[in-house]
Amino acid sequence: MRNERNVTRATITFGLRTFGAAPLPVHVELEYDTLDPYAVATTYHTGAGSVRWMFGRDLLADGLLAPAGEGDVRISPAADLSMVVFELEAPDGAAVLEAPAQELAAFLDSTYDLVLAGQESAWFDFDHEMEKLAFNY
């Protein structure tokens, strides 16, 4: 079932929620790579640099419909259902961002064009993942 590697990307402008002011625009690159079929990578471009987060594709899919996530990344529909809220927590701090639901759904659909939901295991390369771990130690 495994085919050649494919990647889909999208750039979406998120809004960083701030107290008492309009959300600040943050350009976010979303990436889905068939080499890691369970994950979505996001790169948040800030004035000071970039921050990369990875989380499960299922978390994004679930978070478009209802609150999802219990760890560093939580995703849920906003009060305005045209938006989705991302809550990110790290030892260095936390951020709450919002993004257009329609753009996120379009990106998610593009990932399903590459690997159907439930077919991720046919694309998962266990040996490749073990090699990555070996080089990190």
Image: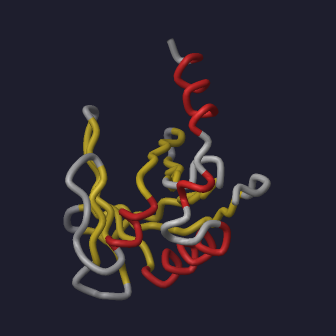
13 or 81, which lies in front? 81
> What is the x, y in percent for residue 25?
46, 65
Q: Quadrant of residue 79?
A: bottom left
Q: Quadrant of residue 18?
A: bottom left
Q: Residue at x 20, y 67 (%)?
A: 20
For this view, does 44 lie left or right of residue 9? left
Q: Residue at x 70, y 60 (%)?
A: 1
Q: Relative to residue 63, is residue 106 depicted above or below? A: below
Q: Relative to residue 34, is residue 86 depicted above or below? A: below
> What is the x, y in percent for residue 14?
45, 67
Q: Residue at x 31, y 69 (%)?
A: 85
Q: Relative to residue 91, is residue 20 depicted above or below? A: below
137 or 79, which lies in front? 137
> What is the x, y in percent for residue 118?
49, 67
Q: Residue furthest right?
A: 4
> What is the x, y in percent for residue 70?
20, 54
Q: Residue furthest bottom?
A: 81
For this view, does 7 lie left or right of residue 102? right
